Amino acid sequence: MFCSGYKGIGLARWLILGLLLIGCTVGIGSAIAVTGPVVIDKPGSYELTKDIIDTKAPVCIEIRCDNVVFDGKGHRITGVDAANSAGVLVHGSAQVSNVEIRNLAVEDWFYGIYVWGAKDVSISSCSASSNYFGVAMNPASDSTVTGSRFTANSYGVVLTGSTRNTVSGCRITGNDLVGVSLYGAAGNTFSDNLFKNEKNVGFINGGTPANAWNVAKRTGPNIAGGPSIGGNCWLAPDGTGFSETGNQSGGFITRPYTVAPGNVDNLPLADHPKDITPTPTANTTPGADDVTPATANGSRPYVTHALPCTIQFEDFDLGGPGVGYFTPASVSNSLYRTPSIAIERNVNESGYHLTGTRFREWLRYTVEVPRDGVYTVKARASSPSNGQYFKLIDECHPKNSVAVWIPTTKSYDTFTVTRGYQLHLTKGTHTLKVFSYGTQDMDWLQLS
């Protein structure tokens, strides 16, 4: 159903529309509010205003026309794993074009996001998990999938008969069968993605049509924390991925990676790049050796913390990039706060967490310590990979730090609490820096 928001509409017509519309309400501004399953058949901007949970609708959001922006605003739409169901379907009686889908999480569908016979479709800052297909293009052309996450699906990304599409800046991990599956798809470009699946790329029906797996080298940072954009980061669940084991230089593996005949990544990214000098900012240098004292670093608390306490990771200090936090890959975030660091809504409970935290990312927290003592440090976090950890650094006494190791949870959506670690703190105001040496989602930090 469609509803319009022209300012000159009369009261009676407002009431009639309110009675007729299902799953859609008229927005006061330029965007139309969506509250439930809806068919969009008129151009315009639409915003999801709440989660849609466990709907039995065969299609939750159906876009049938050109020139549509659908903003999920960080909300989730979940299905019931029904056959051939779709969280979002882009398909019309004629080829649909110029559609944007952003800031949306889709779970428990056959198709998380299904682009069928469309072109010029943009999918950004979305996540798809626990679907059969995370995103499927069948076919699509001249479209982009950027800054999104596809994890714990059967197939992460599927391109069928599709061409001239771009997939970049995505985390395609933990998918049961294949990360990216290609069937008669040629002339597409994959770059700056992180792959970590039992099978990262699969070609269906025997052929391996040529696709590009890197772009020309340019200044980054890239998705693995290196200084330059190029190809993709190729990981494996057992730690033997090409990007994990190859020789590296300048953030790249020193030899090309053959994905399949005619499909070569000429600039594969190094996992945990070595010997990379971070770019300094106006107030601080983003690195583990940053020892700017609390009185001079310019940050100030977003939330007051007095030990013992539990600190939500998303409540990092104010001050902006290089002061309250640093991320090697900025995002456009509109959930909870609006810094250029990724925040997601918790899946099975209230609250939020940091998502996609990676090597070299750091955050500051100002805390009040009531007395000298040894404090126990625990964190709630998730990671499908082994060997992930962060350091908690007392910037008032920089040599005083502790490494907090995160057990593998098999999925970013499954959180666990780490074991306790000991950190000595003196009475007074302290700035604590969390510096990431791994890739994980982070919910809270506890000091007791």
Image: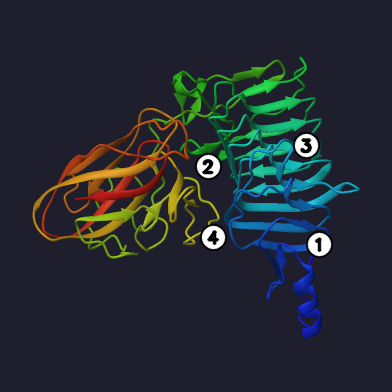
Q: Residues within 10 Å of mark 4 (few under 14, many from 20)?
A: some
x and y, in percent, of residue 204 in the image:
74, 20
Q: Secondary structure at mark 3?
A: loop
Residue wearing tag 3: 164
Going from N to C along the chain, the mark reached first, 3 or 2, is 3
Residue 43 shows which numbered tag? 1
In the displayed structure image, the side of residue 372 where residue 293 appears, left or right: right
Q: Residues within 10 Å of mark 2 (few under 14, many from 20)?
A: some
Q: CA distance from mark 1 to mark 4?
A: 23 Å
Q: CA distance from mark 1 to mark 2?
A: 35 Å
x and y, in percent, of residue 161 in the image:
81, 30
Q: Secondary structure at mark 2?
A: loop
What is the quadrant of residue 111 in the picture? top right
Labels 3, 1: front one: 1
Going from N to C along the chain, the mark reached first, 3 or 1, is 1
Kind of residue at disc 2: Gly
Residue 334 shows which numbered tag? 4
Q: Confirm whether residue 215 shows in the render.
A: no
